[in-house]
Image (cartoon, rainbow, N blue to C red):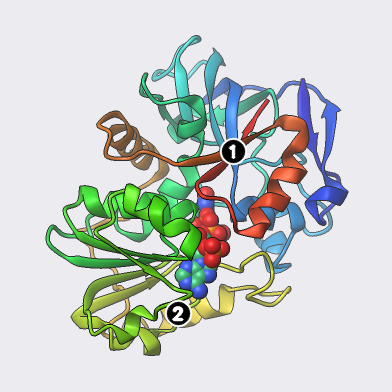
Amino acid sequence: MKAIVQDRYGPPEEVLELREIDEPQVGDDDVLVRVRASCVHPDIWHAVTGRPYLLRLMFGGVLRPKDPVPGMDVAGVVEAVGKNVTRFAPGNEVFGATRTELAWRNGGAFAEHVSVPQDALASKPEHVSFEQAASVPTSGFIALLNTGGGRRIRPGQNVLINGAGGGVGTIAVQIAKARGARVTGVDSTEKTEMVLSLGADHVVDYTREDFAQSGERYDLIFDVASNLSLRGCKRALTANGIYLVIGHDHFGDAQGRVLGSVPRMLGLMAISLFVSHLPKRDPSIPNPNIKDSMVHLAELLETGKLTPPIDRTYPLEEVAEAMLYLQTGRACGKIIIAP
Ligand SMILES: NC(=O)c1ccc[n+]([C@@H]2O[C@H](COP(=O)([O-])OP(=O)(O)OC[C@H]3O[C@@H](n4cnc5c(N)ncnc54)[C@H](OP(=O)(O)O)[C@@H]3O)[C@@H](O)[C@H]2O)c1
C-alpha cells in the first residue's frame, strides 16, 4: 500500500516520504480500515519532529520514530477484523483514533490502510462525511478528557474558550453549547465569524481586545491556546471559577526544545490541590476513556450538535504541505488528508 513514512525526526518537508510498504498486521482485537480521510493537528507535528525531545523518551522512540507512519485520526471503511472483534464487520463505515491512549507518537493513519484497536473506533453517522468524521477523534477526545466528558460544564455556566477557532477549540465550543453553557470564544480576527457560526454566544478578537479587562466573570476558562496565566485569569473568574489549560507549544515557538510545556503542566498539577481556581480530581466525574469518548462524539455528530468545520483537503502525497499550512495558523477549520 501507499503510505507516508519517516525514518528520522525533523521538519515535515525534510523527513516525510511517500512509499510503497506492506499492509499492517491485524491483531485479534484490531480492525483493518481502508482510510478515506485523516487529519493533521499540532500533536502530529510533535510526533513527526520529535519535539520537545522529552516526548521521544516518553513515547515516540529516542533516536528515530518507533512507528514510521504518522497520522493519529482515521475515518474509513472496515476491510477485515481480528477474531475478538465484536462491534464491527467488513463494510462498516467507522471513525476513530488509531490508539486507545493519548500518545505523542505516530499512529499509522497517513496510509491507504491502518490497523486500529476496536475500542478506539465508533460507527460513522451516515450523514457525516469521512472528512468531517476524521477531523474529530483526538481533538474531541482531548476536549472531553479535560472536561470530564463534558460534565464539568454545567447548564447556565459562563464559559470562555481561548483558542476557540483551533482544532480542539472548535469542538470545545460545541460541547459547551451542547451542555447548555453560555459560551465566549476568543481567537484571531479571521476566525471570529466561524466561531460564531459554531454556536458561540459571543466572540472576542484577541488582537483587538483583552477579555480579562471586560469586567465579565467566567465559571470556566478553557485555555486551549495555552498562552494565558492563572494569575492573569483570576480577575475574570467567578469565586469558584476554574482555569483549565491543556498546553500548546505553538510548533516550538512558545516552549523550549527539550521539555516543551511539560514543566508548566506538571507545576500546575502539583499546586492544583492548594489553589482554588485549578481543577481537582472529582471522583463523581471519572475521566472518560477513548471508547466512551468516541461513542459520545458519534452521538454529537449524529444529532447535529457537533459540526466540524473543514478548511481544506490535501492528497496523501502532500502531508508535508498540509503540515506547513497548519503551522501558519491560518486554517479556519481542520486540515484533512485524503488518500
Ligand atoms: N487537535 C488535536 O487533535 C489534538 C489532540 C491532542 C492534543 N492536542 C493539543 O491541544 C492543543 C491545542 O490543539 P489545537 O489543535 O486546538 O491547536 P490549534 O488548532 O493551533 O488552535 C489554537 C488556536 O489558538 C489560537 N490562538 C493563537 N494565539 C492566541 C492567543 N494569543 N489568544 C487566543 N487564541 C490564540 C490560534 O489562532 P491564530 O493562529 O489565528 O492566532 C488557534 O486558532 C495543542 O497543544 C495540541 O498539541 C491537540
Asked whether, in this view, residue 229 is left or right of residue 113, the answer is: left
The structure residue drawn at horizontal position 22% and vertical position 55%, both measured from the top left corner, is: 151
Q: How packed is label 2: few (under 14 Cα within 10 Å), some, or many (20 or more)? A: some
| Between discs 1 and 2, the one toward the N terminus | 2
Residue bearing mark 2:
228
Q: To which residue does mark 1 refer?
A: 312
Q: CA distance from mark 1 to mark 2?
A: 29 Å
Query: Looking at the picture, how far across and down is residue 229, in whole percent?
Result: 44, 84
Q: Residue furthest top?
A: 91
User: In the rendered structure, which amino acid carries the disc numbered 2?
Assistant: Leu
Secondary structure, mark 2, is loop
Disc 2 beta carbon < 8 A from ligand 1?
A: yes
- Residue at x 68%, y 54% (from the top left corner): 45
Where is residue 227 drawn, in percent x and y? 50, 76
Q: Quadrant of residue 317?
A: top right
Q: In the image, which is nearer the foreground, mark 1 or mark 2?
A: 1
- Direction from residue 28 to residue 127 in the image, left or right: left
At 31% from the left and 59% from the top, the residue drawn is 147
| Horizontal and vertical percent position of residue 252 | 69, 69
Q: Is residue 99 visible?
A: no
Q: Nearer the viewer, residue 211 or 265?
A: 211
Q: At numbered mark 1, what does the secondary structure look like: helix, strand or loop?
A: strand
Residue at 49% from the left image edge and 9% from the top image edge: 91
Q: Quadrant of the N terminus?
A: top right
- Image quarter of residue 54: bottom right
- Asked if residue 168 can be seen in this view, the reply is yes
Question: Between 2 and 314, which is closer to the camera in this rendering?
Answer: 314
* 153 vs 215: above or below: above
